[in-house]
Amino acid sequence: MNYKIVADSSIDILEMSVPAFQSVPLKIITSQKEYVDDASLDVGGMVADLLLYKGKSSTACPGVGDWLGAFDDATYVFCITISGNLSGSYNAAMLAKHDYEEQFPGRRVYVVDSLSTGPEMRLIAEKIAELAEKDTDFDEICKQIEQYQKRTHLLFMLESLKNLANNGRVNAAVAKVIGLLGIRMVGKASDVGTLQPLDKCRGEQNALKAIIKHLTELGYNGGKLCIAHCLNEAAALQLKAQLLKQFLHAKIEIYKTGGLCSFYAEKGGMLIGFEA
Ligand code: X90
């Protein structure tokens, strides 16, 4: 099957074990610099710059042309976006799909609104790759992904919600409470793809406890789990170790957030995507 998986760069990975994968960059923009979230971005350097920077900053999603470029000449495209409720990425991808299918009859694009971001997008991409490698038919893959999305979730832990609040992605009052008292916010991606606060925790240990409680409540039972962190490998390793005590054979991956998720999750932030 001539297929390709494309995802916007909020997926946090630049490569997959399958060759037909491409990440389409979002941009992080300050008055001093524009950071393109691709393989050439020094994410650590960007996070360091941003910690010192006091001015306005924002982000920009891929445009229709960027998506079309990534579809390239694949017959079957699976396109995964960050939640359409947080970004224009999904809308642009849908417009690109319509253009592409009209221009090349016979080619098909399935756009998946992840209603989430980061590690949950990665799980979806890996599931698509798994099905495509088995030569599953295009429509069947679409159907199975729709089902799969019902049992994947995203939890997150944030130390600061400054960039989310400044860009209108969360309520400013919520953001203030977290920033002031050194409190961690634990939340989840809601059913409609927005940030849903669950707990305000004092200290990281309490936040980790809350995460484990929510994981179990959401039905985690030792399946695949991906942790993306922004300069907080220690917390990710702790979470992994605690989970492995309870779920001996859990498949847990730890890696760094890319540019877009680092900008919004900020230093210390952690995103957890998992199968229930
Ligand atoms: O279009 C754009 O400029 C991109 C806007 C993205 C805004 C939100 C990114 C959030 C990244 C923060 C915690 C996870 C929240 C997930 C909720 C669905 C990471």
Image (tube, rainbow, N blue to C red):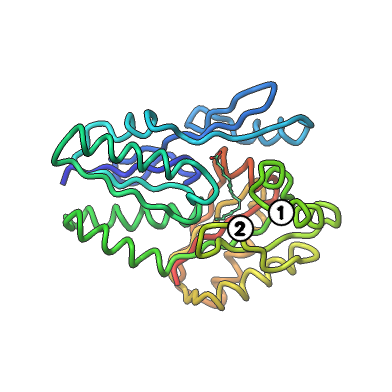
What's the residue at 29%, 45% (across, down)? 18
Checking the image for residue 180, the label placed there is none
Left or right: where 116 falls relative to 210: left
What's the residue at 54%, 34% (across, down)? 60
* 276 and 82: which is toward the camera: 82
> On the image, which quarter does residue 91 sit in?
top left
* 7 and 12: which is toward the camera: 7
Observer-side mark, 1 or 2, equals 1
Q: Amino acid at mark 2?
A: Leu
Q: Are marks 1 and 2 in contact (CB under 8 Å)?
A: no
Mark 1–mark 2 Cα distance, whole angstroms, equals: 10 Å
Q: Quadrant of the C terminus?
A: bottom left
* 4 and 254: which is toward the camera: 4
**Circle count:** 2
Left or right: where 62 falls relative to 28: left
Can you give x and y, in whole percent of width and height, for residue 94 in the image? 36, 43
Q: Amino acid at mark 1?
A: Asn
Mark 1 lies on residue:
171
Left or right: where 233 falls relative to 205: left
Can you give x and y, in whole percent of width and height, for residue 180 in the image? 85, 53
What's the residue at 45%, 34% (across, down)? 62
Checking the image for residue 195, the label placed there is 2
Callout 2: helix, strand or loop? strand
Mark with earlier residue (1, 2): 1
